[in-house]
Image (cartoon, grey):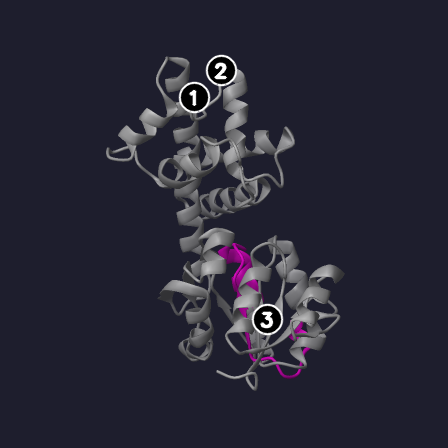
Amino acid sequence: MTSETRIGFIGLGRIGGVMAERLLKAGYGLVVCDTNPEACDRFRAMGAEVVETPVALADTVEIAFLSLPMPSVLKTVCLGADGLNGGRKMKVAVDLSTSGPAIVREVAAIFEQSGKALVDAPVSGGVTGAAAGTLALMASGSGEALDRVKPMFDVLAKDVFIMGDEVGLGQTMKLVNNMVAACCSIASFEATVFGVKAGLSADRMLEVMNVSSGRNFATMQKMPNSVLPGTFPAGFATELMLKDVSLAVDEAETSGARLWMGTAARAFFEHAVSQGYTDQDYAETIKILESRAGVEVRSKP
């Protein structure tokens, strides 16, 4: 693709900014919109066009990508007074956020009345995966819309999964994935705290678990790279994990498949946020468990 192919991007935050930059470097002419002036200035300096409102962006490009923090923000960006739905040129919007199936179906139905399509395509892999282009992307929507955006997906993700032509299935898959990640993380955190309290080495426990049935993303990635060194680099904010888990619990209850472990995970992250863990990576919530037990899960020199 060349810069003659212009696409839009709304939401230049921690992960959105990285994905937008990949698209720009891949040769797409980028039109961006964000409430953060500094983020806009950075992209302007890289050659992107900056517009003030989503509707202005939808008057400029046929395809718009969205990376937004909350479902309420998605609804405002798409359907608000200055939202994408009012634009004359845009034909396809791609929601890369974790918004939940209910809201994307609502937006898609209203878009359809205006001759627009919504593709839901949440991603997994964090900022590191976004920077490397190794994200997993779970997409659903009409075949025609998916065909139009597939070349951009290949810039953003290593693994692209088409979940179906029903909008919302991509979102459901992302909620399933994040629910598993949340539950495994909490179980791994508290079990390792228990082991340290009982006299085991944190490093040795991870060695054993990672070649045994207890291995999961937390034991293989989060704990060795974040918890054991005590660095807790920013990755996925605790308040966003709470949002995703809450969406999953609510959606499951609506569908009649109530979640036991999911409900417990939501309660844990609600407590963590109430204790001030918001922007911090969710791995840092292990400190709550460490404080209760009077130990720290760290590598020994």
**Where, quadrant-wise, is the C terminus in this rendering?**
top left
Tell me the element at label 1.
helix
Q: Nearer the viewer, mark 1 or mark 3?
A: 1
Q: Amino acid at mark 1?
A: Val
Between 297 and 52, which is closer to the camera in this rendering? Answer: 297
Mark 2 vs mark 1, CA separation in Å: 7 Å
Looking at the image, residue 207 sits to the left or right of residue 134; the answer is: left
Image position of 58 with respect to 183: above or below:
below
Q: Are marks 2 and 1 in contact (CB under 8 Å)?
A: yes
Mark with earlier residue (2, 3): 3
Return the residue found at the far bottom: 4
Q: Answer few, some or many: residues within 10 Å of disc 3's Cα (few below 14, many 20 plus, some between 14 and 19).
A: some
The residue positioned 37% from the left and 67% from the top of the image is 164
Disc marking residue 193: 1
How many numbered dots are placed on residues in this image? 3
Which region shows up in magenta?
A: 84-107
Residue 186: image location, x then y, percent = 44, 31
Tell me the residue at 53%/63% (across/down).
Answer: 19
**Residue, disc 2:** 293
Image x and y of residue 23, in percent: 53, 71
Rendered image quadrant of residue 181: top left
Would you place residue 220 above or below residue 21 in this image?
above
Amino acid type of the residue that numbered disc 3 sits on in the rendered structure = Ile
Q: Which residue is mark 3?
A: 110
